[in-house]
Image (tube, helix red, strand yellow):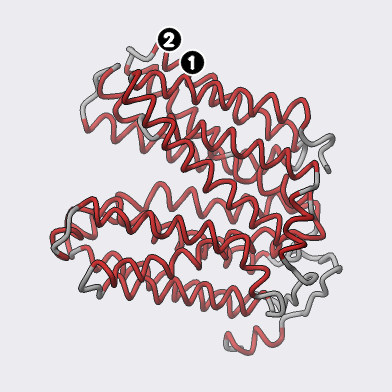
Amino acid sequence: MTDPATAALDAPVLSSTEERADPAWGAVVSLALGVFGLVTAEFLPASLLTPMAQDLGISEGAAGQAVTATAIVGAVAAPTMAIITRRLDRKILMWILTFLLIISSLTAAFASSLAMLLAARVVLGVALGGFWAMSGAMTMRLVPARLLPRAMSIILGGVSVATVCAAPVGAYVGDIWGWRTAFLVAAVVGAVTLLAQVATLPSLPPSGIASLRTLVDVAKRPALQIGLLFILLIASGHFAGFTYVRAFLEKVPVMNVESISLVLLAFGIGGFIGNLVGGFIVERSLKLAAGLSPLLIAISTLVLLVFGASPVTSAVAVTAWGFAFGAIPVSVQTWMLRAAPDQAESAGGLMVTAFQVAIATGAVVGGLLVDNAGVSSAFAYAGIATLLAAVTAFVIGPKTAKA
């Protein structure tokens, strides 16, 4: 048997222009483990906020800044990671980012103050932003072009699983063994991921030399600009509406907490299935996959607005929403990579930044609408924005399945 280090040394070295003939599925799965660990760690504070605040002697609002810190740092790290690490082998970079996940989780687990907790979340933000910026470009070099959507679906499946599992598992572990144990579990996941990456990732020298000029030049490409507009519309619409789905379910179909939990679980399961189906459709038509997902969200919001008083109808509509949103990441990743295949890392960074800006915009717009015009107005905005995203994809989006 060979140990992980030997396996890594024996792995083939891929040039920046070589297309791999045989898919490296082991490496793809190791990246999926990485995104699962990162997103799980990102979501943990949401389910552990109260005990964290009580133990550290701070307010829940202050503890909530642990989430904000990660998002802000991630938005900055994503577009600059390729520039800062432009001469570093991408295999080693991924090892470093996964190691940062471990360090962040351990620091959070042993945090004795808000400052220490925020420091841990800053480190996680660097790892999270860097991973998202690099994962798509790395995947392009791990599988043949025809299998890229399938590979991206596997990697993004880690997001879906983390979305479904992170909050309930974090809450359960925190309730039984304490909130610090939940972060220790995240560190263990990171350690397992690092071993898998050492064993499976081939050497991937930097593809081109990234710079601020490169980032600007890539951002000027029409296909990528349309993709960024698509992201801004669909992500701002989704987060403006879905952030307040619990409030809607409490007030309109008047569901109890147990029923709402089941509906949200259905949303997560729908997202997982949507991710798999989205990858299947992208392999055949990127335009169709990109356009159908926001169109289904728009239809779901319309159903909620018109027929939302029915608990069953609301549950079905929210599940369909989850299915549609689950299919979006693989469409967007594929769109960005095909728009700038020669500068995939810079394109990935711009994609992450666009998502972060859209999330913040959606949260602000949604909050203002809810406070001034009620929950339904946020859903109306979500429907309009996602419908515009669908029109964007169908009318000026990718021209063919390979563009």
Hey, which residue is sitting farthest top in the picture? 306
Residue 307 in the image: x percent, y percent?
Answer: 40, 10
In this picture, residue 292 sits left or right of residue 22: left
- Residue beneath disc 2: 306
Residue 357 in the image: x percent, y percent?
Answer: 53, 45
Residue 17 in the image: x percent, y percent?
Answer: 86, 68
Query: What residue sits 22% from the left and 33% below the top?
Result: 258
Residue 48's place in the image compared with 269, above or below, is below
> 51 or 146: which is nearer to us?
51
Circle 1: element type: helix
- Inspect this view and state whether residue 1 appears: no
Residue 304 lies in quadrant: top left
Classed neighbour count for the residue bearing mark 2: other residues with Cα under 10 Å, few (<14), some (14–19), many (≥20): few
Quadrant where the N terminus sits is bottom right
- Residue beneath disc 1: 302
Query: What residue sits 50% from the left and 60% below the top?
Result: 74
Residue 78's place in the image compared with 312, above or below, is below
In this picture, residue 251 sits left or right of residue 380: left
Count of number-bearing discs: 2
Asked whether the residues under the numbered discs 2 and 1 touch, taking CB atoms below 8 Å apart as contact, a structural biologist would say: yes
> 121 or 277: which is nearer to us?
121
Classed neighbour count for the residue bearing mark 1: other residues with Cα under 10 Å, few (<14), some (14–19), many (≥20): some
Circle 2: element type: helix
Residue 166 in the image: x percent, y percent?
Answer: 36, 53
> 251 or 27: which is nearer to us?
251
Query: What residue sits 32% from the left and 18% below the top?
Result: 311
In this picture, residue 350 sits left or right of residue 71: right
Which residue type does callout 1 highlight? Leu
Query: What residue sits 53% from the left and 36% below the top?
Result: 325
Which residue type does callout 2 highlight? Val
Residue 282's place in the image compared with 156, above or below, is above
